[in-house]
């Protein structure tokens, strides 16, 4: 029986994998697929590039990252036992590392190592584990970029370039035999620092102050500054090689000495197990669902009110994009919510495709045609639409009011609010909620610790980049947001989920759980029975108010919002009828008889007499004055009314003059003139050039059709199984073309040249070879240049050769293709395998 040769390179390790394993690598690191590698060698090269390795490291959990960090400071290659000892220690410390922690590390290490192998960050058998070179460079220590483990360079690395005389002095001070060979001297010093007995004897003879210096360096950073005349404790350490010079003013604690002082551990606190989520409270699941449904109903009402608020054309758009601070404050006042919450509702409606720019010269926000379709949906379906849009949105309203990297204010609906990590954080937070028993409200602090364990590097500086300590013990990077971005996104997720009704009383609702696990239809079915049924009636009162004891059917709510003003909200909504609100309904084309009939049909109480009088009084005066364009004119059959207007001091600014006994002209535009006369107590109506009364339709302004904004993905999308299967087949076929043996023909130029070179044959030889292959069913290797001039190598099995074309099964593309013979640079037969 033969033995399997251990892989010597990452490419060989990948080549030995099965198709499922290669698909797993491409699924975990989808950036390797763009474009699809030509062969395994190119895949391995791409997997070792800095950008790809940094992205892969950012997706590791805390313990997998600690495993990679331990391998970065271990010998290359490192046996499994060496890696395990770097994580568990040698058991000779002061008791910090307990047996149960060592058992947890021993149990978790195979899984962490499997993750690193799957993502091609580690390769080799257990007796020769290798971290890919780029990852080692990113995680290994250097004076500019200290190791995440806090360890410094090895004795050999720190003494490189040190004079033999200085090495002899160190050996003499430590009691080691003198040697003139620098390599032997370094080896002897390394052996001393890794020998627990001799190292303990050396440290027992050290001054107490020297041990204090070591205590400050042992867990990192390992570098310290010294003066030209160091103190006796520092001099004692430097003379014995426990502090080695990096520059004239900097010394470092060598790795071997630090590991002895750490009892062999690469990390002070290994974290093999994810932090558990603590529960704040255990609530009744049904109470949670009811609370969440109540908040979902409030969310729908708030978005509907926002659409009504901007129905006739919303606020103008800033030149740089987004809402001004004043417009956001005005919207918050109208919705009766704080400004940050108003920003959330505005961004949610925008992300759901319900609001957009109208595209006019004076750009304004307005509802989209899709908002009308959304309003026609059942309440449960409207909620699932909002919740699904929120889950996928990359826009983060929590940033509104802050500043970007250039110090510019971030505005609601502005262009700088996209954060690609937001959807991943939202889904991960809700997944942690879903992993708890129903009705359980998790502690936010433990939830944040869990998220930091799962993605310790995400959002922070790249591995190997300088990291500045923060008061909380983390590091900051990436501008003003840094590593805290995911934590902030998680906290915003908790607040937004409660506002939207995803959670109720701090726990995940069953309808949200159904949305995550089964989809929108299942969530709507669960939510529908918990929402109040819309009512078809109101209660009219003698004080010119109407009380809606619950949600109203949409036609009733739309008409009532035109005929009356909302006075208060809550469990019941109170509407107030005023002369202005009745005039608004008349302007919309309603007659007084229509309003009387509407109120009589939808009131459970008799229509109060004061309300009937109000409608009749406003209707009697409505349209008595007519306003058109002259710039503008005022027309009235009653000359006394026009005389009254001219005599009123408030009309001075309108610059009115009489054209006829029943007509006044003004230099003001019709719109301002209409509003001015209404402010003076009149009830004018606008008319067209034909003399017809203009009817103002509520909510007539709509944007052009628009699709919701496409979320900005965080990195390349995860490929589906079909794409993965095709990619693996293409890589395998390309690898076959690049590595398969070709027949050598000494007297023919068809012999393959250097690795990667296209085969070269004459046209006659090419035709003869492919014809023979078509007759015998053989597979050949060809070089091919397409119409764009791009050259490639392919392995094909010719089926038919005629008319200057060869039809063949292309193993590289896994399909039948036809190639013009004049584009084939050469052909070579494949050697038979032994």
Image: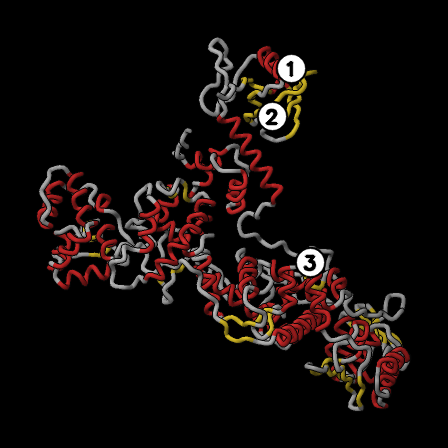
Residue at image location 33% in from the left, 48% down from the top? 81
**Distance from the alpha carbon under mark 1 to that under mark 3:** 71 Å
**Crowdedness near tag 2: few (<14), some (14–19) or many (≥20) residues, C-alpha within 10 Å:** few
The residue pinned by badge 1 equals 775
Task: Kindly report the distance in space between the C-alpha atoms of the residues bearing marks 2 and 1.
Answer: 26 Å
Q: Nearer the viewer, residue 572 or 700?
A: 572
Residue 584 seen in the figure: no
Labels 3 and 2: the sequence-earlier one = 3
Identify whether 59 is placed above or below 609.
above
Q: Secondary structure at mark 1?
A: helix
Going from the N terminus, do you reach mark 1 or mark 3 first?
3
Q: Which label belongs to residue 361?
A: 3
- Asked whether the beta carbons under mark 2 and mark 1 sit within 8 Å of each other, the answer is no
Image x and y of residue 753, in percent: 46, 19
In the picture, the disc for residue 20 is none
Label 3 and label 2: CA atoms lie apart by: 48 Å
Question: In this orientation, does residue 269 appear?
Answer: yes
Expressed as whole percent of the image width and height from the top left, the position of residue 209 reads: 15, 63
Q: Secondary structure at mark 3?
A: loop
Please report the residue visible at 65 percent of the width from the left and 61 percent of the height from the top.
Answer: 388
Taking depth in this image into account, of 53 and 673 the one nearest to the observer is 53
63 shown above or below 497:
above
Q: Are marks 3 and 2 in contact (CB under 8 Å)?
A: no
Query: Judging from the image, what secondary structure is the residue with disc 2 in?
Result: loop
Q: Find residue 88 and report its image quarter.
A: bottom left
Residue drawn at 19 percent across, 46 percent down: 191
Left or right: 113 in relation to 687:
left
- Residue under numbered circle 2: 786
Give left or right: position of 64 versus 520. left
């Amino acid at each position: 029986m033969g033995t399997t040769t251990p892989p010597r390179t990452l490419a060989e390790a990948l080549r030995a994998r099965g198709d499922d394993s290669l698909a797993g690598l491409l699924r975990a690191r989808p950036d390797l697929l763009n474009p699809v590698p030509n062969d395994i060698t190119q895949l391995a090269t791409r997997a070792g590039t800095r950008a790809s390795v940094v992205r892969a490291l950012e997706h590791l959990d805390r313990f997998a990252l600690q495993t990679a960090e331990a391998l970065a400071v271990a010998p290359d290659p490192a046996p499994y036992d060496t890696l395990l000892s770097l994580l568990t220690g040698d058991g000779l410390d002061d008791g910090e590392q307990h047996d149960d922690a060592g058992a947890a590390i021993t149990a978790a290490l195979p899984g962490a190592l499997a993750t690193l192998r799957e993502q091609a960050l580690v390769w080799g058998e257990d007796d020769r584990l290798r971290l890919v070179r780029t990852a080692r460079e990113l995680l290994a220590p250097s004076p500019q970029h200290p190791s995440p483990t806090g360890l410094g360079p090895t004795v050999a690395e720190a003494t490189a370039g040190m004079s033999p005389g200085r090495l002899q002095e160190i050996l003499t001070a430590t009691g080691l035999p003198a040697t003139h060979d620098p390599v032997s001297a370094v080896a002897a010093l390394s052996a001393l620092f890794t020998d627990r007995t001799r190292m303990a004897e050396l440290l027992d003879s050290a001054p107490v102050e020297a041990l204090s210096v070591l205590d400050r360096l042992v867990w990192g950073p390992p570098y310290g500054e010294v003066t030209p005349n160091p103190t006796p404790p520092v001099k004692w350490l430097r003379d014995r090689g426990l502090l080695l010079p990096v520059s004239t003013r900097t010394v470092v604690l060598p790795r071997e000495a630090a590991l002895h002082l750490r009892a062999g551990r690469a990390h002070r606190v290994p974290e093999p197990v994810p932090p558990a989520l603590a529960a704040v409270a255990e609530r009744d699941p049904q109470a949670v669902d009811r609370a969440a449904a109540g908040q979902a109903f409030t969310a729908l009402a708030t978005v509907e009110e926002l659409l009504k608020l901007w129905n006739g054309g919303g606020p103008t758009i800033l030149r740089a994009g987004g809402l001004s601070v004043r417009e956001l404050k005005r919207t918050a006042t109208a919705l009766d919510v704080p400004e940050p919450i108003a920003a959330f509702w505005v961004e949610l409606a925008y992300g759901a495709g319900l609001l957009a720019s109208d595209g006019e010269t004076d750009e304004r926000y307005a509802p989209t045609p899709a908002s009308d379709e959304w309003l026609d949906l059942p309440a449960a379906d409207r909620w699932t639409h909002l919740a699904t849009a929120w889950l996928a949105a990359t826009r983060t309203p929590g940033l509104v009011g802050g500043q970007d990297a250039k110090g510019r204010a971030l505005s609601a609906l502005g262009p700088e609010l996209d954060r690609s990590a937001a959807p991943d954080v939202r889904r991960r937070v809700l997944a942690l909620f879903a992993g708890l028993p129903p009705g359980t409200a998790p502690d936010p602090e433990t939830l944040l610790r869990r998220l930091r364990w799962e993605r310790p590097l995400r959002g922070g500086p790249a591995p190997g980049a300088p990291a500045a300590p923060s008061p909380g013990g983390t590091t900051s990077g990436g501008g003003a947001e840094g590593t805290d971005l995911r934590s902030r996104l998680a906290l915003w997720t908790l607040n937004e989920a409660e506002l939207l009704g995803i959670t109720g009383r701090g726990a995940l609702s069953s309808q949200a759980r159904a949305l995550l696990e089964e989809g929108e239809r299942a969530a709507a079915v669960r939510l529908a029975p918990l929402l109040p049924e819309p009512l078809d009636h109101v209660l009219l009162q003698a004080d010119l108010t109407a009380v809606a004891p619950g949600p109203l059917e949409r036609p009733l709510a739309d008409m009532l919002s035109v005929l009356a003003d909302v006075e208060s909200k809550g469990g019941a909504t109170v509407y107030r009828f005023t002369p202005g609100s009745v005039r608004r309904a008349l302007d919309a084309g309603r007659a007084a008889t229509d309003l009387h009939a509407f109120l009589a049909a939808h009131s459970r109480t008799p229509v109060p007499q004061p309300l009937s009088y109000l409608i009749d009084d406003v209707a009697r005066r409505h349209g008595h004055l007519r306003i058109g364009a002259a710039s503008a004119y005022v027309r009235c059959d009653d000359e006394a009314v026009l005389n009254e207007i001219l005599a009123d001091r408030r009309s001075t600014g309108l610059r009115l003059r009489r054209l006829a006994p029943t007509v006044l002209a003004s230099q003001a535009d019709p719109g301002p003139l209409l509003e001015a006369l209404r402010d003076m107590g009149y009830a004018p109506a606008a008319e067209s050039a034909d003399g017809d009364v203009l009817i103002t339709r509520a909510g007539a302004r709509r944007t052009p059709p628009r699709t919701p904004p496409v979320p900005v993905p965080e990195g390349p999308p995860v490929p589906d199984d079909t794409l993965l299967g095709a990619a693996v087949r293409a890589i395998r076929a390309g690898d076959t073309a690049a590595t398969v043996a070709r027949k050598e023909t000494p007297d023919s130029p068809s012999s393959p040249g250097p690795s990667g070179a296209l085969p070269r044959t004459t046209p006659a030889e090419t035709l003869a070879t492919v014809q023979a292959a078509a007759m015998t069913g053989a597979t050949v290797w060809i070089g091919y240049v397409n119409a764009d001039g791009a050259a490639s190598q392919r392995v094909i099995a010719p089926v038919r050769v005629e008319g200057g074309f060869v039809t063949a099964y292309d193993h590289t593309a896994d399909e039948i293709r036809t190639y013009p013979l004049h584009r084939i640079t050469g052909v070579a037969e494949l050697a038979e395998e032994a």
